[in-house]
Amino acid sequence: MTDSSAPALRAPSAAGARRLVVAAAIVDDVAAPRRLLAARRSRPVELAGRWEFPGGKVDPGETPTEALHRELREELGVTVDLAHELPGPDAGGWVITDRHVMRLWFAALADGEPAPLVEHDELRWLSRDELFTVDWLDGDVRIVEELTEHLDG
């Protein structure tokens, strides 16, 4: 599925603009999600051991969904079917740092078994009750809070 309902944003080029990053809330079933895949960072050292949504930066010339598919292949070795975007409160995105804004899509695995290939050393499937048993990156916490409303107990 594409992001046809979302604006056709590309990576910002203006100095001082927040860099667009994209991520996936990979769930076991997009129609009735019960578990979410979380990834533990292994680098850089200041983020090592903290948990996040898999994804990464949008490169110049890429659409957000192209970047997300590329990042998931590189980081986890998987392809996904993208479902709907989880719009954030910050002009549709989620400000996660003073330099980055994130867009996040629900996704289901289409091909491959997730493995921590790049920048991660562990993956974990979390139920709604387990979401806060891991140490999420600060910028991801409010997104995880929002996701509790979307996961079945």
Image (cartoon, rainbow, N blue to C red):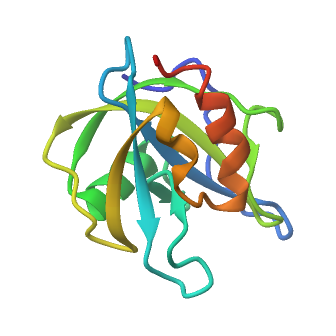
Which of the 4 image quarters holds residue 92?
Answer: top right
In this rendering, position of residue 14 left or right of residue 31: right
Q: Residue at x 15, y 48 (%)?
A: 113
Image coords of residue 62 (percent x, y) = 48, 52
Measured as percent of width and height from the top left, residue 152 is found at 46, 17
Q: Is residue 63 at all visible to an observer of this figure? A: no
Write the residue at 58% across / 46% down. Answer: 132
| Farthest-out residue, bottom | 45
The residue at the point 59 percent across, 77 percent down is 47
Query: What is the residue that sits farthest to the left in this orientation?
Result: 112
Horizontal side, residue 106 vs residue 79: left or right: right
Q: Give the vertical position of 145 relative to 67 (above or below).
A: above
Residue at the image point whose x is 78% and y is 66% from the top: 99
* Camera-nearest residue between 121 and 127: 127
The location of residue 41, given as percent across then percent down, is: 46, 71
Asked whether the viewer can see residue 153, the reply is yes
Q: Nearer the viewer, residue 37 or 99?
A: 37
Location of residue 72 in the rendering, given as x and y in whole percent from the top left corner: 33, 53
